[in-house]
Each structure stands twice: as C-alpha cells, then as structure tokens.
Image (spheres, rainbow, N blue to C red):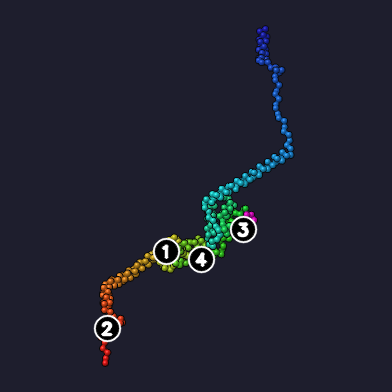
Amino acid sequence: MGRRGGNNHGRGRGHGRGHGGIPFNLENTPPPAEENIPPPPPPPNLAEVMAQQTQLLAALVEGANRRQGGQQNDFQRKLEGFLKLRPPTYDGTDPDPLVADDWLKEMEKKLDLTTFTDDECVGAATHQLTGAARAWWDSFSDSHEDPANISWDEFAKAFTEYHIPKGIMEAKAEEFRNIKMGKDRVTEYTTRFTNLLRYAPSYVVNSKKEKLYYYRKGLNPHIKLKFGGIESNTLRALVDRCIQIEKDRAEAGEEYRERKRKPEESFRGRDRKRFCRDAPSRERSRHNRDDNPGSSRGSGGYTAKYSRPA
C-alpha cells in the first residue's frame, strides 16, 4: 500500500508539471494581418522607353565631354606653369644657326622641369615659335601623317635639319680652324673662339690638347713670342697668361710714351725761358725802329745827303 501510494503520489506530481501554467486556446489566437503589397507598375510605353534612352545617351555624352575637358584643363594648367619659367621664343630670322641651337637646348632644359608627356612637350615648344619658325611648323604638321602624335625626338630632328643646315655648320667649322686674333683684345678673341668652338669637329671639342693648339694658333705674334717654353695645361690658364702678357705690353708702351714725352716738354720749357729772357731786348729794338723810321731799309725814309757828281 505504501509503495502504490507512493506511486500515485509520484504520477500525480508528474502530471501536474506536464499540464500546469496558462492553458493554450487556439480559438482565442487572432488571425495574421494581411501585408499591404502595392500592385506592379504597368509596362512602359514606347514614348517612355525612348525618353529613358535619350537621357542615358545624354549622360554618356556629358561624361565623355567632362573627361575630355578635364584633360584640356590639365594641359592648360601645365602650360601656365611652363610659361612662368619664361621659356624663350624663336622666330627663325637670325642667320646664325647657333641661335636656333641655343633655343632648342634651352627649351629642353625648361621642359625637364615640367610634368608634360612627350606629345605635350611638342605642343608647349611649338607654342613658343613665332614668325617664320611658326610658318615652318604649321607646314610641317599639316603635311605629317599623324600630326597629333609627333614625338619630341621627331620634332627636334626636323627642327635641327631645317634651322641648323649642315652646310652652314661646315662653314663655321672652317672659320674656327682659321680663326685669327687680329686687332681684338684677348678677352674679345677668347669670346669669339669659345663661340666658334661649338662648330668645331668632335675631336677638337673632346680634346684639351686640340683646343690649346687652335687657341695658340690664332694669337698675334707679339703674344706668342712671350710664351717661350711656358706650357699651359688648361685653356683657362692659357687665357690668363695671354691677358697678363697684354697688360704688361700695354704698361710698357705707356712707360715708353711717358719717357718720350718728358724730353719734349723740357725742350719746350727751355725755349719759353729763352723767349721770356730775350723779350725786353726785342721790345727795345722794336721801339728804336719806330722812333727812327729812316734807319729802316726799304722804308723810303732815307734822308742822307747826296751829291750828284759834276
């Protein structure tokens, strides 16, 4: 009995745990709310499709123009910065080919300081061409197969061939080989020698010995004789030596003229003293002649008595 009662007590507790709490009544559960889903839009008609395509095409064109305009604005900004470097202009009228060569080298130095692309370098350089040089460039670019893509090397080669002719370069090289000092001072001769050295053959430009040879070859004889056995290792040392010789020669000439001037001044001084010392006697002689005019020969005032013979 006790074990069965215990069993009943156990089952009763278990039953209470399994079905205790708030009872769940399906009848009292509210139904789910219905969702407010909008109806699908009607399909677009032909006019609306054409309008959408037109808007899309306009947006594409605007984007392309914006990108192209950005590139143009970028080049304009670079060009403005380049012009602040004060690049030189070239008009092609100077007959000296060194002027064209100097312009091209100066442009390369200025362009190295910029962020231009290769094609933009050509545009910036040709921006500085004026007059006859600009007319040459217009003609060259018009006849080019692809004028929008001319590289810098191609431009530099064409510019050199046209504005720095080979014949003129050879004539200038010959002028260098036959250079003479003449009546120039040493500094003037040195400047002319340095300018013509740019036309000299490469074996002269790259050889210190050849430079010294041609410089001494063109000096005046009176400067060459002063060298004796003295040799100069550099052109600068040779020029300094020539300047000193010229200075010494000028001082010696001035000293010689000064010595020659002093005896002449001393001789003229003695003559003035003698003239001043003899001036009173000459004055008295003149007064005597004025007081006795008959004593003057040839004056017609001779009054001596004359007896005519019988």
Which of pointers 3 and 1 indicates the residue nearer the eye?
A: 3
**Magenta region:** 135-147
Q: Residues within 10 Å of mark 3 (few under 14, many from 20)?
A: few
SS for dot 2: loop
Q: Position of residue 65 (x, y in %)?
A: 63, 45
Which three-letter amino acid code belongs to the residue tagged 1?
A: Cys
262 is higher (above) or lower (below) than 54? below
SS for dot 4: helix
Q: Magenta stretch: residue 145 in it?
A: yes
Q: Residues within 10 Å of mark 2 (few under 14, many from 20)?
A: few
Circle 3/circle 4 CB separation < 8 Å: no
Tell me the tag on residue 303: 2
Q: What quarter of the picture does the N terminus occupy?
A: top right
Which of pointers 4 and 2 indicates the residue nearer the eye?
A: 2
Which three-letter amino acid code belongs to the residue tagged 3?
A: Ser
Q: Position of residue 161 (x, y in %)?
A: 58, 60
Tell me the tag on residue 181: none
Which three-letter amino acid code belongs to the residue tagged 4?
A: Glu
First reached walking from the N terminus: tag 3 or tag 1: 3
User: What residue is shown at x 55% (from left), y 58% (from top)?
Assistant: 91
Distance from label 4 to label 1 (Cα)?
22 Å
Pick whichever, 76 or 300, lies toward us: 300
Q: Is residue 165 something one can see in this rendering?
A: yes
Q: Residues within 10 Å of mark 1 (few under 14, many from 20)?
A: many
110 is higher (above) or lower (below) than 31? below
Q: What quarter of the picture does the C terminus occupy?
A: bottom left
Circle 3/circle 2 CB separation < 8 Å: no
SS for dot 3: helix
Tell me the tag on residue 175: 4
User: What residue is shown at x 66% (from left), y 15% (from top)?
Assistant: 22
**Residue on which the image places disc 3:** 139
